[in-house]
């Protein structure tokens, strides 16, 4: 059952219970009121009859006085009087006032209120005056009052129900909007926004939803860019491998094939003594192919083959041989068995890109590479140079288009890490600093940023 219907049903049940309780209370008070009024009327009538009987000895016509005494109860609202002879036969009976609305029968039965009759003997003539209380008039009066009270209570309950339904509907409308928005998010629409109005609690909920959709949209955009970047890198890598195989391995295979054909041709002739020379050529070609294949494999999986520390040392040695004017300091103090291949690859590529940028654009004399555990579950990667650094306005003097920040940032974001670039030591050069969690978690609370 929807939340709105459940709330309305709950509130309606409370109102119905309140209405039933109020009606029962009104009926209980009505029953007490009827019995009280009848009792009081019966007491007054009894006193009136006894006073009249006490005055009979001085009356000239006692029988007529008794009839007159009973007639005084004509039109009474609560008590009917009857004069009976010695054989309980009626001599005179008063007429009770008949109300215009005596109330429904079920209400009279529910209220009740009937009292026992009072018999008062008349000593002078041996007769009896009987006073019979009748609640019909009092019940009719109470019925009108009770009906009006219940109608007022029912009207109040109805108005309250309508008001509460309106309030509940308006209060739950933002939740329905949020529910529809969540359905859109489930379909991949991360650009849906909801209004941040209404009660403070719902406004905060709407604000959180909008913030969530912004982050999801940003993550979806980054994922799309990462996928595009991955496809581009894969295409470039395939093209490079194809070029290497065509330019390096292809000619060697052709030479081996031609040499084998030559051996086959001269095997049965008088030039068979040249076969060892041709076999040596095949061995040389195969050795060169093996070296090229090893280079390709190391390029494809350099870290799995030689490890992170060795790969970075070779990277530094590569630049030392080409830039002897720059000194390189490498410090790698991580437990490689605690990190996966993807994280090693990311660290290696960050260092590779950072060193390349520093050397090509920073004009440094020294480059420092430091990789260490910053915490139990985090690795700190630093590439620091003493080059031209940043301008006074905080902008890099290097060409931003050549810094390769996009690729590094995407790699770091894929590992749920963070990346920053700041001035190097003593205000010279730049420091590229990356923080990477040891356990890759795309749901990390630390959103990757570039400062």
Image (spheres, rainbow, N blue to C red):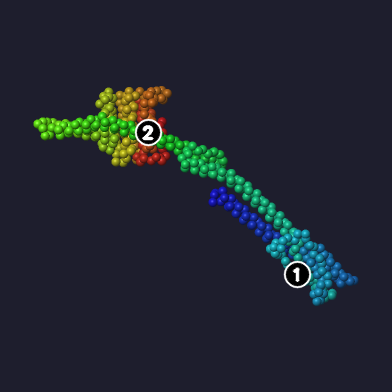
> Quick check: 205 left or right of 60?
left
**Residue 117's disc number:** 1
Q: Quadrant of residue 23?
A: bottom right
Q: Quadrant of residue 425?
A: top left
Nearest-to-viewer mark from 1 and 2: 2
Q: Position of residue 145 (x, y in %)?
A: 72, 56
Q: CA gap, disc 1 to disc 2?
A: 106 Å
Q: Which residue is mark 2?
A: 229
What is the crowding at mark 1: few (fewer than 14 residues within 10 Å), some, or many (at least 20)? Answer: some
Residue 438 lies, with reference to residue 406, above or below; the image says below
> Quick check: 221 left or right of 332?
right
Q: Residue at horizontal 14%, vertical 33%?
A: 265
| Local SS, label 2 | helix
| Local SS, label 1 | loop
Q: Position of residue 397 (x, y in %)?
A: 38, 23
> Quick check: 48 left or right of 110?
right
Q: Quadrant of residue 126?
A: bottom right
Q: Earlier in the sequence, mark 1 or mark 2?
A: 1
Q: Position of residue 380 (x, y in %)?
A: 34, 35
For the question of whether residue 159 can be seen, the reply is yes
Q: Residue at horizontal 71%, vertical 65%?
A: 113
Which residue is at the far bottom?
87
Residue 122 lies, with reference to residue 170, above or below; the image says below
Q: Residue at horizontal 82%, vertical 71%?
A: 83
User: Which quadrant of the figure contains the C terminus?
Assistant: top left
Q: Position of residue 114 (x, y in %)?
A: 72, 66
Residue 194 lies, with reference to residue 4, above or below; the image says above
Which residue is at the far right?
60
Query: Front-most of 47 and 292?
Result: 292
């Amino acid at each position: 059952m929807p939340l709105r219907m459940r709330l309305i049903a709950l509130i309606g049940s409370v109102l119905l219970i309140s209405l039933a309780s109020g009606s029962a209370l009104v009926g209980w008070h009505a029953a007490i009121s009827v019995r009280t009024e009848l009792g009081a009327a019966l007491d007054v009538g009894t006193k009136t009859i006894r006073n009249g009987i006490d005055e009979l000895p001085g009356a000239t016509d006692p029988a007529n006085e008794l009839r007159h005494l009973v007639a005084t109860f004509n039109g009474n609202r609560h008590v009917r009087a009857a004069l009976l002879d010695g054989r309980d036969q009626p001599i005179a009976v008063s007429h009770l006032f008949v109300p215009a609305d005596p109330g429904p029968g079920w209400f009279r039965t529910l209220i009740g209120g009937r009292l026992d009759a009072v018999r008062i003997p008349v000593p002078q003539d041996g007769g009896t005056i009987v006073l019979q209380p009748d609640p019909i008039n009092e019940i009719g009066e109470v019925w009108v009052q009770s009906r009006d009270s219940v109608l007022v209570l029912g009207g109040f309950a109805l108005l309250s129900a309508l008001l509460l339904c309106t309030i509940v509907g308006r209060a739950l409308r933002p939740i329905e909007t949020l529910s529809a928005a969540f359905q859109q998010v489930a379909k991949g629409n991360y650009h849906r926004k909801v209004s941040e109005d209404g009660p403070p609690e719902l406004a905060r909920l709407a604000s959180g939803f909008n913030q969530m959709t912004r982050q999801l949209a940003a993550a979806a955009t980054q994922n799309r860019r990462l996928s595009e970047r991955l496809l581009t890198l894969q295409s470039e890598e395939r093209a490079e491998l194809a070029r290497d195989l065509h330019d390096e391995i292809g000619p060697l295979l052709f030479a081996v094939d031609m040499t084998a054909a030559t051996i086959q041709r001269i095997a049965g002739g008088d030039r068979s003594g040249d076969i060892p020379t041709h076999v040596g050529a095949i061995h040389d070609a195969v050795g060169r192919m093996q070296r090229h294949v090893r280079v390709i494999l190391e390029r494809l999986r350099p870290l799995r083959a030689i490890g992170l520390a060795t790969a970075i040392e070779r990277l530094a040695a590569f630049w030392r041989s080409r830039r002897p004017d720059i000194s390189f300091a490498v410090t790698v103090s991580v437990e490689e068995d605690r990190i996966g291949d993807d994280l090693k690859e990311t660290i290696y590529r960050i260092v590779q890109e950072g060193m390349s940028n520093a050397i090509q654009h920073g004009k440094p004399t020294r480059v420092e590479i430091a990789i260490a555990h910053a915490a139990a579950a985090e690795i700190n990667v630093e590439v620091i140079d003493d080059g031209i650094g940043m301008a006074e306005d905080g902008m890099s003097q290097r060409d931003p288009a050549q810094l390769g920040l996009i690729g590094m940032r995407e790699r770091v974001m894929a590992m749920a890490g963070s990346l920053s670039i700041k001035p190097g030591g003593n205000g010279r050069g730049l420091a590229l600093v990356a923080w990477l969690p040891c356990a890759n978690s795309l749901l990390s609370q630390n959103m990757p940023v570039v400062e």
